[in-house]
Image: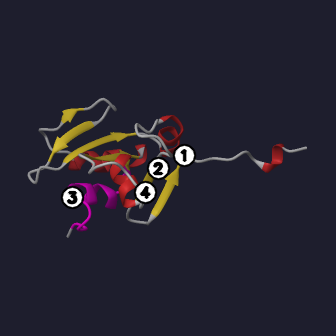
Amino acid sequence: MAHKMLPRLVYQMCVHGGLLVGSQAKRLAGESIDGDPADWDVLIPHEKWQIIALLIPEDAKPNKFGGWRMVTKEGDEIDVWPDSVINYLTNCKSTKGGRVIAMDFIHNRIYSSEYRESATNED
């Protein structure tokens, strides 16, 4: 049974290692966002892509991230694409500003684009 906060397909992808990103991830992490996010974005670590790709419906369309966009029977819009968490957090720009996050919903972890200088560089 899918978690009540996530569409069934998104939950299945998360169970197999997908990470929530974008506005929905920020909302679930408790951050304030404008409006109700229209779609779900799921980043798939490269090592999980082969398994999760089997969940993508045949009628999915290519998206701008090099992955797939689909609409479920329930009307949920979902974008999925393969990428590394480090590449995503390093290179993604938040359209509304603020930090970029990737959420491991199953293990209750949030990875963030926040960083700090290493203390080893001090004299």
Q: What label sits on residue 113 in the rendered view?
A: 1
Distance from Cα at disc 1 to Cα at disc 4? 14 Å
Q: What label sits on residue 31 in the rendered view?
A: 4
Residue at image coords 48%, 58%: 110
Packing grade of label 3 (10 A; few <14, some 14-19, many >=20) is some
Residue 30 lies, in percent from the top left, at 41, 61
- Answer with mark 2 or mark 1, whichever residue precedes in sequence: 2
Q: Which residue is mark 2?
A: 101
Residue at image coords 12%, 49%: 75
- Amino acid, disc 2: Ile
The reply, left or right, for residue 26 in relation to residue 74 is: right
Secondary structure at numbered mark 4: loop
**Marks 2 and 4: in contact by CB < 8 Å?**
yes
- Answer with mark 3 or mark 1, whichever residue precedes in sequence: 3
Extreme-left residue of the structure: 73
The C terminus lies in quadrant: top right
Q: Which residue is mark 3?
A: 7
**Marks 3 and 4: in contact by CB < 8 Å?**
no
